[in-house]
Image (cartoon, rainbow, N blue to C red):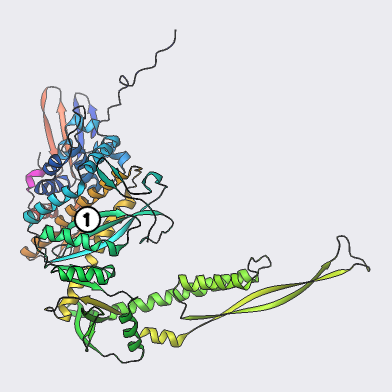
Amino acid sequence: MRKRKPSRVNRSRKRKPTGRQARVGRQTLRSEKIGALPILNHFIERLRLEQWLQECLPLEDKRVKVPAAKALLVLLRNLLISREPLYGMGEWAAGYAPDLLGLTRDELEALSDDGVGRALNCLFRSEPGAFVLAVVRHTIRQFKVTLGQLHNDSTTITFHGNYSEAAEEDTRGGQRTLAITWGHNKDHRPDLKQLVYILTISDDGGVPVHFRATSGNTTDDQTHVETWKLLCELAGRSDFLYVADSKLATAENMAYLHQHGGRFITVLPRTRGEDKAFRQSLREGKVSWRTIYEKVDEEDDQKKVLDRFSTTNEPTTSAEGYRLLWYHSTRKAELDALARANRIQRATRELDELRQRLGSPRTRYRQRDKVTMAVEEILKSRETKDLITVAIEERVEERYRQERRGRPTKDTRYVKQISTRFDLSYQIDHARIAEDQRCDGVFPLVTNVLELSEKELLLVYKRQPVIEKRFSQLKTDFRVAPVYLKDVSRIQALLCAYFLVLLVESLLERELRQAMEREGLESLPLYPENRPCRRPTARRVIDLFDDIQRHTLRSDDEAPAVFVTELSALQRRILKLLGVPATKYQA
């Protein structure tokens, strides 16, 4: 008789235990992590994320054990706390108290990476853009985020793999899918495919207010008008100050914003004629500067100047007639000089390596054209073409070999062979370096704003690096939590989840820092050895509460007793500053 194969329905998945459990005699002790979940839940509730998800997500099959809204919020908490890969989601969640994850014990046991993947599909079908817009509008009202200045930038999300099914844009379930393809990679990995991630943050606390993902071959200058239109809809006006990188500085982009009542600040690209003309005037010593701002560090009652900013005395305009301001930074000048020295050092090292290969008896560089191309490639990649002069020297070598094989005798005839070998020498142009040093630390800003002074415009632009911090958090998350997703729709939904991660982190930091300012606190002892931290980050706060646990002791004939790790004085202080009731950490 043949053995009957068990049906798929009858094969039950092994139940994973929740928390850690130990039994001694008639008593059972279950330990579950709490960590920073009450704090994160406080912000998730204020954002009303579960409500927005339930309203936006499509209807699900009644057989689904974990609703998509709950699965997505578990994913959000995971990304904020530990950034586990999706395939480890169930195991990670099993260590935490299910009620703090918004799950019942049965839902926690049913949670799996496949369920989270289906939840991402639901988010994609719901049009994530409309969901994010609703969340951000509520965030602005709930947290009173001002939108006077909005900073925009983009980065690339790099993917390892072929992703042939996402090679071109398409539609799926009525929604547009993006093309994971090659483009200008900002991670300096042109060999890998990518998507472009566009982020806009407010000047008020660096809170993300808009994100958009586009295909990997999208250029930045094509994204600004559409982004600005959506920000106008979000802000309810067009006169906010829009700060962006040099890709905004095209005649079409600036003209559109200016003609529609927009105000912008951007960087003039190095490819513009105005830049070339100004730097030539600098080399000729025709430019004078005046100091407008000093960045100082007050420590031990001593003022240390970290950076000094200057601007030109003569006002200038761009080719389109916009206000053009030239600035000089002493710190940037130091960094520019260091970067140039590093480029020269790398170029000379690579030229020395090429020279050794040319001298090898088995060299492949037998033609002058190949040597010339190799030299040009080195100078181009290190941007030192104008700083290093290379001379290629050619010499003829003669050698003799026997006409035939065998032991040589007095009658052996020899054949002369002539070969061409190459060598090179290089010289660093110190005069050109001295000229370039006059241009170190210089950067131009172009704007249509007339009412702000040179110093005020500079301070507005100096807020732009805050968005780089958000990108750094995004890239760190992606490195720590590898995501093996082949479905481009799930990838796009995951990028939406990461926007929510950045939103919660930024609001936590903003609320804590504002509370410190109200209380007159200059710092909190969040660093190791209780060293002071002047600008606490979400990561520091989450790590501070990592060891908080809940212990439930059960006896066969008694009511369960619940114990929670006692909070330290610093933890209680953080909770008070954030407005989170300490009762959230009580049994």
Q: Which residue is mark 1?
A: 211
Residue 582 counted in the magenta span: yes
Q: Write the residue at 19% across / 55% down.
A: 538
Residue 438 counted in the magenta span: no
**In the image shown, does 487 or 308 lie closer to the viewer?**
487
Q: With respect to residue 279, does 208 lie above or below? A: above
Q: With respect to residue 355, does 1 lie above or below? A: above
Q: Write the residue at 37% across / 60% down.
A: 185
Quarter holding the C terminus is: top left
Please state if 331 lies on the left or on the right of 58 as rendered.
right
The stretch of residues the image draws in magenta is 579-584
Res 566 → quadrant: top left
Res 211 → quadrant: bottom left
Res 4 → quadrant: top left
> Is label 1 in a helix, a strand or a loop?
strand
Quarter holding the N terminus is: top left
**In the image shown, does 499 or 324 lie closer to the viewer?**
324
Q: With respect to residue 515, does 307 lie above or below? A: below
Q: Residue 119: tell me if it is visible.
A: yes
Q: Write the residue at 90% across / 67% down.
A: 412
Residue at the limit of the structure toward the right, as seen here: 411
The spot of residue 558 in percent (x, y) is 10, 25
Label 1 crowding class (10 Å Cα cut-off): few <14, some 14-19, many 20+?
many
Q: Residue 462: tell me if it is visible.
A: no
The spot of residue 196 in percent (x, y) is 31, 56
The spot of residue 130 in percent (x, y) is 16, 48
The spot of residue 125 in percent (x, y) is 23, 41
